[in-house]
Image (cartoon, rainbow, N blue to C red):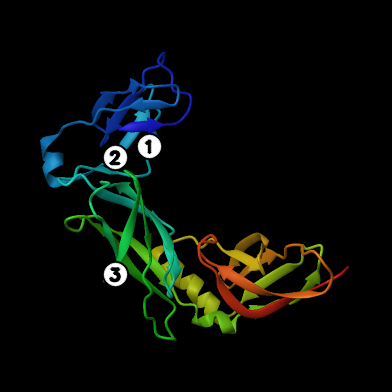
Amino acid sequence: ILVHGSGVSAVVPIHCQFNHSSWSTAVIISNKTAKCPLPMDKATVLTGEELSFSLTTNKVDFIKSPYPLRYSNDDMYLTHINPKIGPSFGGTRTDVYGYFKKNAKMKCMFGDKTTRAIYLSNNHIQCISSPIFMEESGRVMIVNVSVSGSHFLQQSAGFIYYSTHFSNDMEISTTHGVTSGGTMVTIGGKHLTDVLDGIKNIGNVAVTPVVKFGTNLASNSRVLDSNSIVCNAPSRDGDFSSVPIYLSLNGGVDFFPLNHQFHYYEK
């Protein structure tokens, strides 16, 4: 395993620990890279059991990897995806991480829908989420995301779809602000509350909102509580103008329009 970071030194030995028991000594490649030999435990290889992985210089204090390792007979495996949420109309550019083969002709499955996988590196592919039908009363739905080469891998990750049917029912605290920007705007409504609560309850995934006024991003977009999202309107050149408001719940990857305009005026 190649480990990248900073402060790597050949003077201080680095020890690699697997499953809190198996040890190997890292080979120093550079001042930013070390290589940890994997233990060859036959039982672990055959069962595909996950391995925890940590680094230490004194066998007392450890830096633990947030992602487990796994032996796989077909070599390819999936560890995690980002973002973990997207709108029900699909089109979310989803980064999938793990280990993949360049010539494997991979596909991704979002639930029972197949999409093409784009190979970026041995550790990174990208897939576009499929659209999914949700009843108008529906708010959120979780599906499994999996990857196939010659067959589907054992590992999968959860992806949460959220409905945007509620966008016409959103409430805006103010629809007017100065062209210099900074006006605090609160976005809320019962349906938004249902979506935020649903995402939290179904997958315990953090919502990272981004609000856009026309083509300009608002500042300090954040979830204020389970009922609302707040932001500060961006500045805008000119005097009187009106712009549409867009909202993203997945860090700006996907936006959908709100049924509101924001009107700028000179201070």
Residue identified by numbered label 2: 52
Looking at the rendered image, the disc whose residue lies closer to the viewer, 3 or 2, is 3
For the C terminus, the quadrant is bottom right
For marks 1 and 2 on the same chain, the one whose residue lies earlier in the sequence = 2
Q: Is 154 located above or below residue 266 in the figure? A: above
Residue situated in front as seen by the camera: 123 or 166: 123
Q: Secondary structure beneath disc 1?
A: strand
Labels 1 and 2 touching (C-beta < 8 A):
yes
Residue with the most extreme right position: 267
Residue identified by numbered label 1: 64
Q: CA distance from mark 1 to mark 3?
A: 32 Å
Q: Is residue 189 left or right of residue 267?
A: left
Neighbour tally class for label 2: few under 14, some 14-19, many 20 plus, Cα within 10 Å: some
- What percent of the width, then of the height, locates residue 136? 44, 86
- What percent of the width, then of the height, locates residue 142? 35, 69
- What percent of the width, then of the height, locates residue 102? 27, 46
The label on residue 111 is: 3
- Amino acid type at image mark 2: Ser
For marks 3 and 2 on the same chain, the one whose residue lies earlier in the sequence = 2
In this view of the protein, can residue 174 be seen by the observer?
no
